[in-house]
Amino acid sequence: MGYEYIEKRRNNAEFFKNRNRSTSKVAVINTEESNISSISDKNDYLDRIFEILISEYDFPVDNTAIYYIFDRDPKSNLDKGLIRKLIGQLKNAYENYNGQRGGVLLLSCPSIGAYIVSNFIDDTYLMEFDIGNKVKEYIATQNREAQLNRITTETLERAANEMMKYFEAEKIDFCIDNIGQMNREVFEGQEAKYRKERVYNLVSLL
């Protein structure tokens, strides 16, 4: 889509940068570990990556919207207390409480596969899965159209509409200036469903 794109994958020492030249830049960075607790960054891993982005790639980290994208799979990210804490802390993409670096936590239930499926299937939010691997199986066996390399501007719009359908169904007010409260309502609603039925609605906040 014309963005200047920079990527740093976990366990890969090198950065990748595409050949585009644009004032619109996107950087996709893996945290040090796949678990959501790595957001806390006790080893300053992300701070070191941010420094490289600033100094070597002229990437304006401190003037950039930051999003932390994680799965809500009950077999991987188990610490519900930590997730609630992070939702409370990470509420603004540009700047958080007390001058802390910006960042918003965006969860996908039960996995990022929810977002991929929502690009291609209507009423995705009515579908139910318990763990992320089941979503992968669904894509592989029942809907092979749902692939990253087939996402377009049109499918992105469909995914956004699918998210809004879920908000409307759950009577969650969409307010771009209060993402923290919105995230909390989605999380608590999905947790209540999982406790009762052992499944999540297929929903991604991405």
Image (spheres, helix red, strand yellow):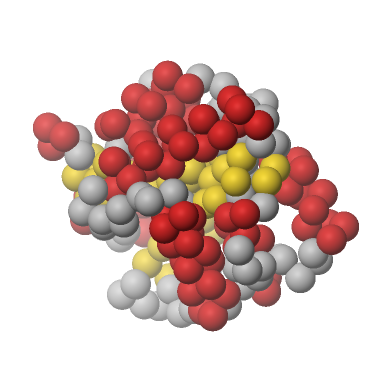
In this image, 163 relative to 177: left or right? right
Q: Furthest-right residue in view? A: 141
81 to 155, vertically: above or below? above
Residue 92 position within the rendered picture, expressed as x and y whole percent measured from the top left: 24, 46
User: At 77% across and 43% down in the image, what residue appears?
Assistant: 134
Front-lying residue, 29 or 39:
39
Q: Quadrant of residue 141?
A: bottom right
Looking at the rendered structure, the number of numbered marks drawn on it comes to 0
User: At 76% across and 41% down in the image, what residue appears?
Assistant: 133
In this image, 111 relative to 162: left or right? right
Q: Is residue 112 visible?
A: no
Q: Furthest-left residue in view? A: 98
Residue 14 position within the rendered picture, expressed as x and y whole percent measured from the top left: 56, 49
Q: Quadrant of residue 39?
A: top left
Front-lying residue, 139 or 67:
139
Residue 197 position within the rendered picture, expressed as x and y whole percent measured from the top left: 66, 31
35 to 123, vertically: above or below? above
